[in-house]
Amino acid sequence: DFEAKQEMVTTFESNILDNNNMGFYFDWVANHNVFRKNILTGNDYGVYHDSQWKGDTYNNAFIDNEVYNNYYGFYLGASVDFILLKNNIFNNHAGIRLEKSYNNTVNQNNVINNTYGIYVNGDNNTFRRNNVINNTRGIEISGANNTIFHNNFINNTVQANYPNVGNSANQMNYSTLV
């Protein structure tokens, strides 16, 4: 396990974290970190963060990581302004799970062969240019004002489930459903 603790501002690059309970574990106020070109495999959680009872964690970026054969690829709870960019996320139970998280950006990821490709319980998250392929459920969202724009949903058993919650609608625009 690798733990990012409070008040760290660091780049974590080119690590291999396998067969752990948690690959990367976030303390409740680990802000402004960059995780790049890491391999996270065979863990219960590839990336785990959940500070719902302690306060939000802000501005962490995951770029060009390989996240596979974990139970959860990314489990992010109470995460704000996180960026997931150009990651390969495959063969997990849940590829990306955002729980009570908001204002996150998920761009240009390959989310392939998971049970849940992307599962979101949160508001104001943006999903752009992701390839969501061969999952049991492509994307499932509960929350408000989430934007799903220019994604490819291909050969998922259920492509997208995004019910409107409250008075605010989630929006799916210009995405390919095949």
Image: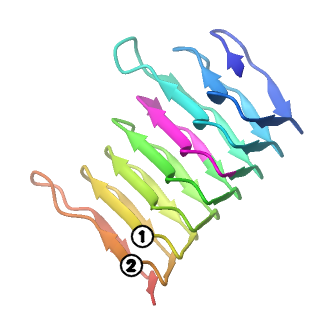
Instruction: Report whether 50 appears left or right of 160.
Output: right
Residue 125 image position (x, y, % from top left)? 41, 50
| Residue at disc 2, secondary structure | loop
Q: Characterize the local packing of mark 1: few (<14), some (14-19) or many (20 or more) Cα atoms within 10 angstroms.
A: some
Decide: is 2 above or below 157. above
User: What residue appears at the point 70 percent right and 56 percent down from the top-left corner?
Assistant: 87
| Residue at disc 1, secondary structure | loop
User: What residue appears at the point 71 percent right and 27 percent down from the top-left corner?
Assistant: 33
The residue wearing badge 2 is: 157
Question: What color scheme is it?
Answer: rainbow
Quadrant containing the N terminus in the rendered view = top right
User: What residue appears at the point 60 percent right and 60 percent down from the top-left corner?
Assistant: 107
- What residue type is disc 2 on? Thr
Decide: is 115 above or below 60. below
Q: Main secondary structure of the magenta part?
A: strand
Q: Are marks 2 and 1 in contact (CB under 8 Å)?
A: yes
Q: How far is disc 2 from disc 1 in space, using C-alphas? A: 5 Å
Q: Which residues are magenta?
A: 68-83
